[in-house]
Image (cartoon, rainbow, N blue to C red):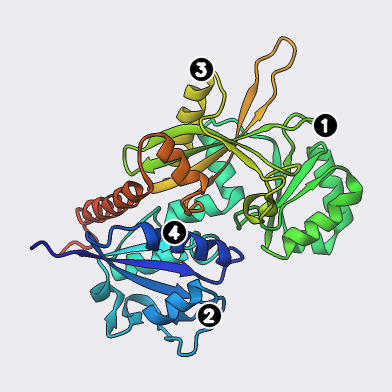
Amino acid sequence: MKKKQRIGILFGGRSGEHEISLLSAASILKAIDKKKYDVLPIGITKHGQWLSAGEAQALLTGGESKQPLQLSAGADLVHQSGNLTKTVDVAFPVLHGTFGEDGTIQGLFELADIAYVGSGVLGSAAGMDKDVMKKLFAAAGLPQTPYLALSRSEWKADPKRCTRQIEKALQYPLFVKPANLGSSVGISKVHDRSELATAMDLAAGFDRKLVIEEGVGGPGVKPRELEVAVLGNESPEASVVGEIVPNKEFYDYESKYADSPEDPSVPIIPARLTAAEVKEIRTMAVAAFRACDCAGLARVDFLMEPARKGKKARIYLNEINTMPGFTSISMYPKLWEASGLSYKKLIDRLIVLAVERQMEKQQTSFSRD
């Protein structure tokens, strides 16, 4: 009888997206094929403590850890009776945001020589840092809205100078974001100067680097928010295009995750677009995936400026997310479901891609011996 692969599902973590990670992991743990895999839940608390399987399950349901396992660094990270290398065949880090989606946990897996789902150190780090990401998009010739990056220290030292710099380079409305975070945490839409300082201070609480973007289309224009799921390693594929119609001015954290049964954000899959627009967006999604050296999975987000008299609608690349929300109703799985790949099969495919990438890396020599 063929031995089942043991899959370590990592979730929680020190990120501001801790709770979203718990939701994603709970969905995967429920759907993953237990006949095909031995599944090991590995929880990480908000304080960075790694938990045994029983305590990890408690974390999923809001329980407190009573006996956390304090794990050491590197390939000797102990989980229960053995280290990670001996305990799991494939790690599935369902960790959104800082310390999970930014290359840090991926570096650990690389040191431990463990196959893992998703992008490597470089792709994860580049996809997490919106400033670096945008530089890579620009180098690849991908269209995006004008932006400016400033450090928290610059803002705190001289907010008036920074305000002048922002207003010289960009036009209102603006979007102010922490460079390294996801799920729209810490993001504000700024309509004029009176709102700028509050938005900058909010973003500065989440990261040392701030990204300020010019709103697509200018004042009073609400661009369409489009999303594509990408899957693969060396030959990535794009899903159908989906659209989110947010229940607020833009698709912020509350629009994504807060319950609003009377006025929910509405996903439209597939989005109502022309064949030429779909082709353009899907091509750009794969190009963005390659520009950031991603692997496994990513969701690529776009903003579409409404068509104007005599001009066609313009499409801008917004950002890439290398570990998107992964509940059964999240956009990434829903886009693939609409493309013919079920949630359970999507999990299988990601595990296969992780193993394939690990096998490809084994062709690389790291010494001359």
**Between residues 325 and 268, which one lies in front from this camera angle?**
268
Distance between mark 4 and mark 3 Cα atoms: 35 Å
Q: Amino acid at mark 4?
A: Ser
Q: Which of the two labelled residues, at mark 1 and mark 4, occupies the earlier sequence position?
A: 4
Q: Which of the two labelled residues, at mark 4 and mark 3, occupies the earlier sequence position?
A: 4
Q: Secondary structure at mark 1?
A: loop
The disc at residue 220 is 1
Q: Which of the two labelled residues, at mark 1 and mark 3, occupies the earlier sequence position?
A: 1
Q: Is residue 51 above or below residue 196?
A: below
Quarter the N terminus occupies? bottom left
Distance between mark 2 and mark 1 Cα atoms: 45 Å
For mark 4, what is the residue? Answer: 27
Q: Is residue 161 above or below residue 232?
A: below
The answer to whether the residues at label 1 and label 3 have Cβ atoms under 8 Å apart is: no
The answer to whether residue 291 is seen in the rendering is no
Q: Amino acid at mark 3?
A: Ala
Q: Amino acid at mark 1?
A: Gly
User: Which label lies toward us, 3 or 2?
Assistant: 2
* Quarter residue 180 falls in: bottom right
**Between residues 360 and 9, which one lies in front from this camera angle?**
9
The answer to whether the residues at label 4 and label 3 have Cβ atoms under 8 Å apart is: no
Q: Position of residue 52 (x, y in %)?
A: 39, 81
User: Which label lies toward us, 4 or 3?
Assistant: 4
Instruction: Residue at 70% x, 23% y: name it.
Output: 306
Instruction: Residue at 61% x, 49% y: name it.
Output: 131
Q: Position of residue 169 (x, y in %)?
A: 78, 39
The answer to whether residue 115 is seen in the rendering is yes
For mark 3, what is the residue? Answer: 276
